[in-house]
Amino acid sequence: MKPKSSLAILRAGLVIGTVFLASCQLFKKKPPPPPPEPVKAEWKYPGEWTGGDKPITRIAINVDTQRATLYSGGEVVGWTYVASGITSFPTPIGEFKVLEKVVDKVSNLYGKGYDASGKLVNSDFKQGRDVIPPGGKFVAAPMKYFMRLTGDGVGMHIGLISKPGRRASHGCIRLPSKMAPILYAHTSIGTPVTITGSGPDYKTYLAQSAAKAKANAAKYASAKKKLDDATAAAAAATALAPDDPNGPNPTPTNGTTPAPAPGTPATTPAPAPTPAPATPPEEVKPAVPANPPPAPAPGTAQ
């Protein structure tokens, strides 16, 4: 028997390795695909709850259909419309968990800006990007029934969904006012939340957020400078020159009387008032009796 050539041995080794790798792939455990979204004849806003007092053990959100499916174990116990982030403020895609629950939370970034007279001047005000006029105020946007999903503030909460099925938020997941209390009551901290559809993964989302924060800081600095310049110009336009006769006389620092402004008639100081003479003390006379006794007869002893 002739010994096998090295080429034949090499080929045999490649075949065995390929078979081994293929067998490994067959035995490799793959994660189960997410269950399909339930099919309904009519998706009537805002959603429905059929779980009674069962807990929600998982939430699956699809940002393409703008709907969330609620699970208790393997059972679908409800669904709701949502409104995720618009294209310029997308909601991140991936696996998350409920990290925090706050019933009456308000945003520390978004809200409305008012001027000193109370007039609304910015309905989409953002802290660190926009500037409040002097004397104005910032009113934070409400985020009732807030359930946090990320450390930088993405979460689920009540929000306006004026056009169901369309994206509308700054990145959070808005819930209808009738469904948010149900989700809040039946969801615990640690509940998994899967977000699928068209959008950036969380790492890409964070990079995009950092770039926006840098751009917002530059925009804020520019707006603040313009406001400061306008305020200074307004103050300069109404200020009087030091030698303006309409301005107040400067206060002397050496105790002398300041010279009158040019064009001001000289005035003579008014004489000091003469003190009034002291009132003489009132003379007190003895009282005269109403019925004086008769005078004694001459020669009568007193």
Image (tube, helix red, strand yellow):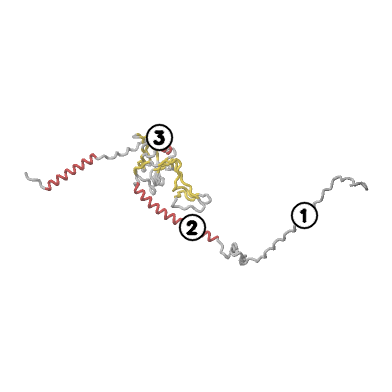
- Label 1 vs label 3: CA separation? 100 Å
Q: Which residue is at the front of the view, 125 or 256?
A: 256
- In what element is the residue under mark 1? loop
- Label 2 vs label 1: CA separation? 70 Å
Residue 65: image x %, image y %?
37, 41
Q: Residue furthest right?
A: 298
- In what element is the residue under mark 3? strand
- In what element is the residue under mark 2? helix
* Residue underneath mark 1: 281
Q: Is residue 296 left or right of residue 172?
A: right
The three-letter amino acid code for the residue at tag 1 is Pro
The three-letter amino acid code for the residue at tag 3 is Trp
Mark 1 or 3 closer to N-term?
A: 3
Q: Residue furthest left?
A: 1
* Residue underneath mark 2: 228
Q: Quadrant of residue 259?
A: bottom right
Residue 119: image x %, image y %?
51, 50
Mark 3 or 2 closer to N-term?
A: 3
Residue 49: mark in rendering: 3
